Each structure stands twice: as C-alpha cells, then as structure tokens.
Amino acid sequence: MRKIFPPNELARDERFVRTKIEDRVLDPRNMAMMERDLGSAKLEPSRPAAADRARSLMHGIFVGEIQALEGAGRTCFDFDDEDAPFALKLDMARQCWDESRHVEISVKLSEWMGTEIGEFTESTFLYEAACADDPVLRLCGVNRALEGLAIDVFNTMKEFGDVSGDPVLEFCEDWMLADEVTHVKMGSDWLRRLTEKDTERRNRALEFQRTVDKIFSLGGFRGEGDENPIHLARRFRAMAGFDDAEMDELAEIAKQAQADAEAMAAAAQQGGAYGA
Amino acid sequence: MTITVTPDPFRLVPYHTATVHGLAVDAARVTGFPDDVDVALEIDEVLPHPLTGTFVDVLGDPPRVDMWMSGANFEDPKRPLQFQHELARAELARAFLRACDRLRPEFGNAPADEELSDRQRAAWDVWTEGRAARLGVPATRPDRLLYHYRLQHGFNDVADAVFERLWHADALTWDDLEQACRDTDAADTRERPKRTALRKEQLRAPKPDATPA
C-alpha cells in the first residue's frame, strides 16, 4: 500500500463535488462584494440568510471532519516507528476515533438543519495539509493550525446554537469542541518532544503552521473583527496550549490574509468577468 | 403581463437573462399569477451562495410587482457561479406565490418585505413553501425550511405545531399569519436582543435615492 495518499484520489461517492481554493479567490463577484456594506459577518439568527449560512458552515465542518479522519489515519500508516514513535501513532489512532464520531455527529446535525450529504461544495485543502512528508509538519499543519481553526469554528457554532435557542446544536458543538482542544494539545506536545534537539526542524514546522493558518484565514474568514464570521476562541485556545503571543500572531496573520485576498480580488476584477 | 428581468446581460455570473425570463413566465403560469399585472424582476448578481434573499412588493395603481432576488438563490451550492435551473424554478415559484398574496385585499395591511420582522417572514415562507410543494414545484424541502423557521420562531413544540398548520393551509390572510406569530411568540422563552438596529440589516443594497434612517 502506497504512502502519502494524493488528495485527488480520496474516496467519495457521486454526492460530493470538489472546488479548488483558486476558484473562490478568483470569483469575479469578490470585489463587488467588498464594496457592498453587508454589516457584521457574525453568525446570528437575526442576520439575513442566517439559516443558509449556518447550514453551509455545518457542511464545511462535516467534510472537514472526514478529511481530518483521513489525515490522522494516514499519519498512523505513512511513517515508520523511527519517524513517528508508536505513542504518537496511538494518539493519531485515538484522534481517528474522535473524528469518526465527529463525522457521525456532523451528519446528524446536518440532517437536523435540513441539509443533505454533499449538498454544498467540498474543498480538500484540509487534507492537503496532512500530506507533508515530515510528521512534525503534519502535527503543526493539522493538529495545531487546523484543529485550532476547528476550536474557533465550533465555538462560533456553539454560540450560534446558544443565541438561537437550538439545544441540539449547542450541545453537540460543545462536545466536539472539547475533543478539538485535546487534538491541538496533542500537536503541541508532540511538536515539543520530537523537535527538542532540532530547532531547525521545529522552526520549519512552525513556518508550515503559519502558512496553513494564513490559507485558512482567507478573505477574512477568521479574525477578531465584526467583518469576520469566525472569531478566534482565545479562551479555548489557551486551554489547548497556545500562549498570548501565538494568538496575537494568528490575529495578525488573519489580517494579512484578508488584505491579500482583497488585493487578489482587485487584480481578478481588472482581468474582466462575464458578459459585455 | 410584462415581465422585465435585470440585469441584461449579467456581467459577474454566467446567467442568461432570457433563461431567467423564461422561468419567470413559467412560474407566473404555475402559480396563477394575474395576466394584467406587470413584474419587474431584479437579480442581484453580486451576492454568492449562501447569501440568499428575496423581496416581493406591490407598488402603484394600477398595481405592479417589484421583485428583488439574490443571485445566490439561483446558484448551485456545489458549483460556485453555476446557474441551477431547478433551484431557480422553485425560487421564482415562491416569489410569484407571495406576489399573488400581496395582490389580494386580505394582504393589504401587510408591511413591505423589508419591514417584515424575521418571525413574520419565516411564517409566510412556510405557508408559501407548503403551497409550492402541493403545486408540484421541485426542490421544496420541509426539513430545510423547518430549520430556517425554528431559528425565528423557536425550537419548541408550539412552534412546530404552528409550522404544520402553516404548511398545510390552503388560504390564509395577513391576519392569520400575524396570529401564527403571536402564538409562537407566546411560547418563545429565548432572550430578546437588548438593542435593535436603526435600520434592519438587509443583503439588498440601499437604493441610491433612499434616505438613511
């Protein structure tokens, strides 16, 4: 069986349709959207299209959980015991169990919200972060960056469930949030242990984490302002082992990502769109 | 009856004005929309999925119908920018059903769409979707609408019973919809927001001549 499984060969049935991150960045509507005052981006029941926004985000969580399961599973298999100690693989196996449960919870939550499996598009860039050939990079890209993002997303959805009086959503998100804190902590612990005597490797891994964080803050998706739908969950991130300096840096990365996306959208706009 | 569709042509999304017009004509026929009322249908091509939204209002004398729809209402959620016929057909049928309602005297005292509360709008949407389903309009989804409705009316048995009542109703008045809202409001124990915005937040861009509140 081959190592490092390519993202385009992940098994999906005909319900799933994939899009590339470039499609989103180069969407000809982006610039006009930025010029439109749409108010706060915070997910609240009183905001226009609140139900569709929440359903879309929930489906994004669902496919993210599938890919997190696939990524953790690959890390159990792709490395020998010298590259990745058995205890690390045991942690990844435990994470697979958690992610499987999250997939099942997400399917039921999606049904609860009136969403069908595959109703929305899937991007595979979460799994792509789990294709690094160094397990430490994977732990930084997936466990610290992406599971960290999951903390922010689940906390946002939990708050949405609370405000909208949806006991099912609030309860389920709270349980999954607890698991995500554990997954991030696993990443932080293994990063420290595996790079204890190799600063260069640690720096390379942290740089990879910053890159992943920037991609996932794309276009202001995450940040600390009213214009960001997903907010940094500082309290839960602190529980997972992030210090204040790391969280401040992440907030800065998010701001940069938003500025970059605005610049790319402006460039795409100049390149023309449809019609006359 | 004249139906005019704007923009013509679409510049940001690969939608075709003639296609939308054809589907609108079909929706008018399916919903029994009167022959002597003109319709101006504006599609806001800037908004992507999931930023969906529709406003339907009756203006002037003789009456004409003004429809505004987000381009996201017609966009395939799996394939950004792609027009989805079945979705568009269903969205237009809903809009024409609500236009028919507004042309009836029993809806004469209904506020304009931008002035409706989220609760009122969600109740009206349920009644609309129920009728669309009975007309055989594809892509009508009670489960999907139930979540949208519960966000505004509450996650409780009273709200669910009112949902069933609205979904299966054949003929309602504006007063009936208001009564439904009062019923769910009385059973809703959720905290109300302490502040309300001066202008209700909308996806629709303010018209150039609109005076700020």
Image: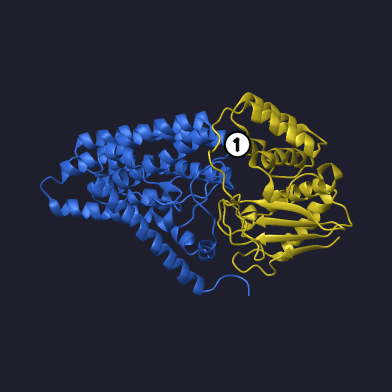
Chain colours: A blue, B yellow
Looking at the image, residue B42 lies above or below residue A69 = below
Judge left or right: residue B30 versus residue A124. Answer: right
Q: Chain of mark 1?
A: B
- The percent coordinates of residue A274 (x first, y second) are 59, 70
Q: Residue at x 82, y 58 (%)?
A: B60
- The percent coordinates of residue B199 (x first, y second) are 60, 51
Q: Does dot 1 land on a helix, a strand or a loop?
A: helix
The one of A273 and A156 positioned closer to us in this rendering? A156
* Residue A96 found in image quarter: top left
Mark 1 surroundings: few (<14), some (14-19) or many (≥20) residues within 10 A: many
- The percent coordinates of residue A24 (x first, y second) are 48, 59
The one of A85 and A126 positioned closer to us in this rendering? A126
Q: Tell me the residue that label 1 is attached to.
A: B147
Q: Residue at x 53, y 61 (%)?
A: A33
The one of B183 and B99 positioned closer to us in this rendering? B183
- The percent coordinates of residue B205 (x first, y second) are 61, 60
> Can residue B86 be seen in the rendering of this structure?
no
Amino acid type of the residue tagged 1 in the rendering = Tyr
* Residue A111 found in image quarter: top right
* Residue B74 found in image quarter: bottom right
**How many numbered callouts?**
1
Judge left or right: residue A152 versus residue A132. Answer: right
Of the 4 image quadrants, the one containing the N terminus of chain B is bottom right
Looking at the image, residue B178 lies above or below residue A266 = above
Q: Residue at x 74, y 29 (%)?
A: B165
> Can residue B69 be seen in the rendering of this structure?
yes
